[in-house]
Amino acid sequence: MALDLLTVAPDYPLDLLTPAQMGAVDAQAALAGLVVFDLMDRAGTEVAEVVQTRWTPRPVLVLCGPGNNGGDGWVAARRLRDAGWPVRLVSLVPLSALTGAAAAHAARWSAPVEVWEGAGPSLGETALIVDALFGAGLTRPLPPAVRRWLARTTALPLVAVDVPSGLDGGTGVPLGWAPQAALTVTFHRYKPGHFIMPGKSLCGDLHLIDICIPANIRPPDRIETQLNHPRLWQTALRPPRLADHKFTRGWAMIRAGHPESGGMAGAAILSSRAARRVGAGLVSLVTPAALSDWPGTMVTTKPWADACAEKRATGFLLGPGNGVSPATAAAVLAAAATGAPLVLDADALTSFAGDADRLRRGLAGPCVLTPHEGEFARLFAGTPVDLTQGRLSRARQAARWMGATIVLKGPDTLIAHPDGRVIVQPWAPPALATAGSGDVLAGIILGLMALGISASDAAAAGVWLHAAAGQRAGAHGMIAEDLVDFLPEILDKFIEKSLY
Ligand SMILES: NC(=O)C1=CN([C@@H]2O[C@H](COP(=O)(O)OP(=O)(O)OC[C@H]3O[C@@H](n4cnc5c(N)ncnc54)[C@H](O)[C@@H]3O)[C@@H](O)[C@H]2O)[C@@H](O)CC1
Ligand SMILES: [K+]
């Protein structure tokens, strides 16, 4: 089910654990006296519960693998059978190959078992598949026969235990291939692969089960990936103070309406409105062409160099409707050299395609880059960033190398910081994929940075506010202008209230 961004519980777990970290938590839980047999019992029992909530009784085929993921499957099969469901259980390995808690739960199964042979089991009446083949322990692609069997059953709904077998929970990238699940039930904490494409899509609806591992049992290393939520940054946002005047709330400069883009300024106007809505004191559109009047936004035809020389400027945005050109690249470098907060989007990024190192060397202050996949690939081609890796790894590498915050946009927008942390925005309505939406996002981040908020907080807050405005706007008929108009309501309800 799509988790509701606006109502998610304040104690919702934000940490995303890699399979190795989850393994470390499991191991510590065992050391702390928790019994794997009991954890597995809870896990499998809850899988069966969730299945019964979602589907009426029907012939179900439970596929159990060789490890603990398979163990969860044995429990789920037993619970479903106890509840009166027609259950077939197929074990990938002979029962003699099972060990530990999985073997103990297998011993409690009192009905016939089919052991996988050749091309796999016949489907018969099967109307639902439970995939308990491999979870966190998968280290290599699925056996070819398993892959072929799963690929033939795509017409049936599949419930994945922990992850669709074949998906790397750490990255969201399949180890070769993974089936499409209708529902994925996972335990204790979500993993990055549940929210990062293509894993996010392969998992279908997500359900997190508390198997009663205490929250103080944590992996020994730093948790580097988290879900985005106001809890992470809301103390950085502040309501206007009594003593404020427009310059204490920041002066943002936006480069707009350049001849290379045919003089179009609409994108920059959207950005400027967004920057003002989130609280920037003053926003200037710096443009060589006269623009029609935009009340509240200052329009100036002074040269960009003059804008960069303005000591009171607290933020610059380049990109929206700037045109891909050496002039745009030069304007970026001029703004970057000031050391003031900088947001780069669209054409400002593509103007450095094949020359990203020049941008990297030119950055003198905090910077947020907001590429979508195509802009990211163009910008980082030929750099040390390995473009063959999944989105999480690529975003992380790019932020480290560039020394800037990277907002890699998509249905799973990633906010990667130079220190290796990545914040994942899991809930973004697909309606946000519309012209002008990116200009609004860049403007929100600019406005927050111009207010003095750090690049990392501004990027995470900006992405969240943008998604929340999109959710508030609804599934149909939303245009980018609407996002801007919903911002005050979102800020009011979710940010400032928490500060008083
Ligand atoms: N450890 C715990 O405390 C708990 C673990 N749980 C479950 O345990 C799972 C992890 O269990 P495991 O670590 O045993 O890992 P898995 O059950 O995912 O798989 C491990 C087994 O698969 C084999 N294997 C890996 N890749 C293979 C491939 N491509 N072809 C054939 N064999 C392959 C491994 O050699 C190993 O025998 C989780 O995903 C979760 O479902 C739950 O029971 C909850 C409690
Ligand atoms: K699985």
Image: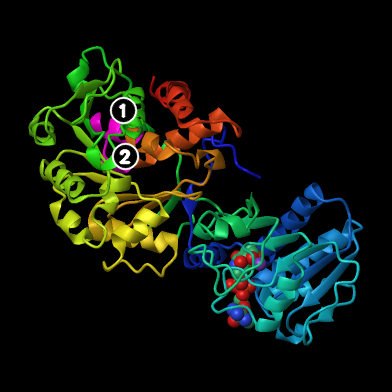
User: Is 361 left or right of 475, judged from the image as shown?
Assistant: left
At x 21%, y 44%, the residue is 366
Type of the residue with mark 1: Ser
Ligand 2 is found in the corner quadrant, namely bottom right
**Can you tell which quarter of the image residue 448 is in?**
top left
At x 62%, y 78%, the residue is 142
- Is residue 177 visible to us here? yes
Q: Between residues 424 and 326, which one lies in front from this camera angle? A: 326
Quadrant into which the C terminus falls: top left
Magenta stretch bounds: 444-456
Dot 1 or dot 2: first in sequence order is 1
- Please identify, in this view, whether the residue under mark 1 or under mark 2 is nearer the observer: 2
At x 56%, y 66%, the residue is 30
Q: From what the image shows, is residue 340 above or below residue 493?
A: below
> Is residue 496 rendered magenta in the image?
no
How far, Cα to Cα, is label 1 from label 2?
Answer: 11 Å
Q: Between residues 329 and 406, which one lies in front from this camera angle? A: 329
Q: Secondary structure at mark 1?
A: helix
Residue 320's disc number: 2
Q: Position of residue 136 (x, y in %)?
A: 57, 68
The prevailing secondary structure element of the residues shown in magenta is: helix
Type of the residue with mark 2: Pro
Quadrant into which the N terminus falls: top right
- Is residue 35 visible to us here? no
Residue 272's disc number: 1
Q: Position of residue 489 (x, y in %)?
A: 47, 21
Q: Residues within 10 Å of mark 2 (few under 14, many from 20)?
A: many
User: Is 86 left or right of 162, judged from the image as shown?
Assistant: right
